Image: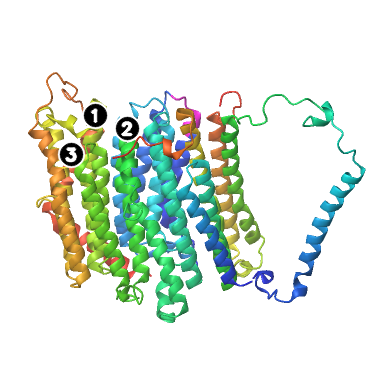
Amino acid sequence: MTVGHLITLSGVLFTIGMVGVMSRRNILIVLLSVELMLNAVALAFVGFGAWRGNLDGQIMVFFAITVAAAEVAVGLAMVIALFRLRLTVDTDRVSLLKD
Amino acid sequence: MREFNVALAAPEWILSATILVVLFQDARTRWDNKGGLGRTTWLGLLLATGCAMLQGWFVDTPATAFLGHYGVDGFSIVCKAIFGATALFVMAMADTWLKRVDRGHGEFRLLALMATLGMFFVCSVRDFAGLFVSLELITVSFYCLTAFKRNDERAIEAGIKYVVLGALATAFLLLGIAFIYGATESLWFHKIALTEASDGVGGNAALLEFGLLLTVLGLCFKIAAVPFQVWTPDVYEGAASPVTAFLSMGSKAAGFVLLLKVVRACLGPDGDAGIILATGAWAGLFALIAAATMLYGNLGALWQGNMKRLLGYSSIGHAGYVLMGVLAFNEAGFAAVVYYLMAYLFTVLGVFAVVIIVNGALRSHAITDYAGLGRKSPFLALVLTCGLLSLAGVPPMAGFFGKFLVFQAVVQLGTPVAYTVAFVGAAGVVVSMYYYLCVVKQLYMVEAPEGDTRLDGLVVAKPLKAVLWVCLIGIFVLGFLVQPFVAMAQDAAEALMAAR
Amino acid sequence: MLPFLLAEANQPRDWLPVLVLLLLAVGLAAVQLLISWLLGKRGETNEFKDSPYECGIEPVGDAHTRFSVKFYLVAVLFILFDIEVVFLYPWAVHFGGGEPDGVIFQERPDLLGFLFFEMLVFLAVLFLGWYWVVKKKALDWERV
């Protein structure tokens, strides 16, 4: 197993997450996909760090985890607020703002 | 570089302490007794901004703290002054606006303070870890601020759109940082130039360029540029007006400050175009983004009947103009960016102050409802007119000189790409003139419908009146007394170029 | 750095432990299924056999009930405070003078006090946040 394998895996996970964000309509699934993307990047950091024999990458992973948790917590709070107002978590049915 | 030098971060310490005090106060007081929070917030913001500006005289710049991860130089001081002024103006608008909101005062002030703290850190970061964390501090605070009116479907919808797109952009930014880290073996900005110099266009260069591309795309979300611009009109419309004002100035300027830092990091040690940026492909990429952004913003604004959506599209257009300053990749361009941000501060916040006052009376953002404002409230109409003309770039106003410097910096490059993007920009200015003047026409040439008394006898609260006056004066000072401010912007750009 | 990630696991015998684990896992599951198939009385059904649980309390209502919003709120708060604690681990490793930065502390013992103070501030901020959450009655189960 080399750094190439790790980065490829990270890229595949990142792409799966990105496709999920763009194609799914359930906001909860979208948030899960976002989490997948951020964790894929965390894997890339660890991979590069191991390749370079450098600890900075692992430090970035801590920050990435924390920020991902904060973003998803805020996202989830908004989903709850939306559900209270509209009884739906479907992005297609949330479209008051448009040209 | 091995020193902590804690006292250097005094503005950030003051802001952090203010946040903690407000948090404590908010926990201790009942929901109907939040006046003390406002006083603490004002005191903290004034002290922090004053402290940041005083550092310009009393600190031997450039200085670093926290083992070199935090730096103070001429560039960071000017940017902190801009952000401090933005936060103060926004807080004055929020004071008035919060009177119409029955609860959540503590949360609003806390989130606004945290966003300001992030903006202050953005000015001083010297590595990618700091960039990421400070940027996310701003972004997450703005997610919450956007959806602040949680019983309003529009606000929640805007918030969700902002979160989803923002998280996507965050992931791109982080992946970019990961690749830059892989190429340079470190998170420092200045290691990029060193890696370029030692590796040339070898194996690491591909990693580095890919990482830079993703980082720039991630930052495009913050500055509302193509390809991450679609959230702008929706979020501007859905969010509360003071939040929109903060978003249009603070969040965008933070993105540009970081973009400047990243671009600077790619330049050579003497300020010459680095190996990567000199290839021309990067100038082309930035030109493409700038041109697409200007076209999208200015054409999209043409058919808007909602004032805040119009300002959203116009803000996309302005991101394109400022990007022209970035793509010059030299000191003149960076100085133009700083000057443009200074001019934009007074202009856009003046416009938003009027929008908040008018919306307080109208409960609507339809441009047709602004009819007759010129007769009913001449001062508000005057500020709005001056602000819009300054946005359009009409000569005696601040906005004109910002645009002038940006176009000058690009045209001086003399390359076909530069001429093309300048031409697109000029076309954008002409188009934008039309939709700004349509609003002005509505103010003066159209009478309010018979019996519509909503705009009669508008009372402007004292803090908002102060904001209106300062913005009006600022618009003209930065249009007439150009020299000292251009010198300031040039000093800032020089400090940025000298940063290590 | 992480030698097990980078070491060449090219030799087939390097994968032997994985194979053994795999065989054990599949084998155990198969044996259990086989035993229940051999010893169990197949084809015999009655009221109790068809119920979700053969003993204990009778289930009430639909299994797909919705979770109350309260759970989400508490879960969100839990995630945030849980994740913040992640910063304690690297701090503890450094503070103990662990491998990577031990040298710095030998040169500069005064940094230890600074590091300790920094963590105190971090915990104080976290604690203040928790106090705010309690005061806002976000953890008040009856009110949420």
Using the rendered view, name the quadrant where residue B263 is placed. Answer: bottom left
* Residue, disc 1: B461
On the rendered structure, is C38 left or right of C58? right
Figure check: A18 above or below B141: below
**Secondary structure found at label 3:** helix
Output the chain of dot 1: B
Chain to which mark 3 belongs: B
Residue at mark 3 to residue at mark 1: CA–CA distance: 12 Å
Q: Which corner quadrant of the image does residue B331 belong to?
A: bottom left
Residue type at mark 2? Asp
Counting residues from the start of the chain, the first of labels 3 and 1 encountered is 1
In this figure, which residue is indicated by the disc labeled 3?
Answer: B469
Residue B29 belongs to the span the image colors magenta: yes
Q: Amino acid at mark 3?
A: Trp
Depicted B110 relative to depicted B174: above or below = above
Query: Looking at the image, can residue B259 be seen?
Result: yes
In the foreground, B183 or B86 = B183
Same subunit, tags 2 and 3: yes
Q: Which mark is residue B95?
A: 2
At label 1, the amino acid type is Ala
Which residue is depicted at the point 49% across and 41% down?
A27
Q: Residue at x 61, y 27 (%)?
A: C141
- Are marks 2 and 1 in one subunit? yes
Measured in 3D between alpha carbons, the distance from the residue under mark 2 to the one under mark 1, in whole angstroms, is 9 Å
Left or right side of B297 for C43: right
- Read off the magenta span: B25-31
Residue B99 image point, x, y percent: 33, 27
Whole-percent x and y of residue C53? 80, 31
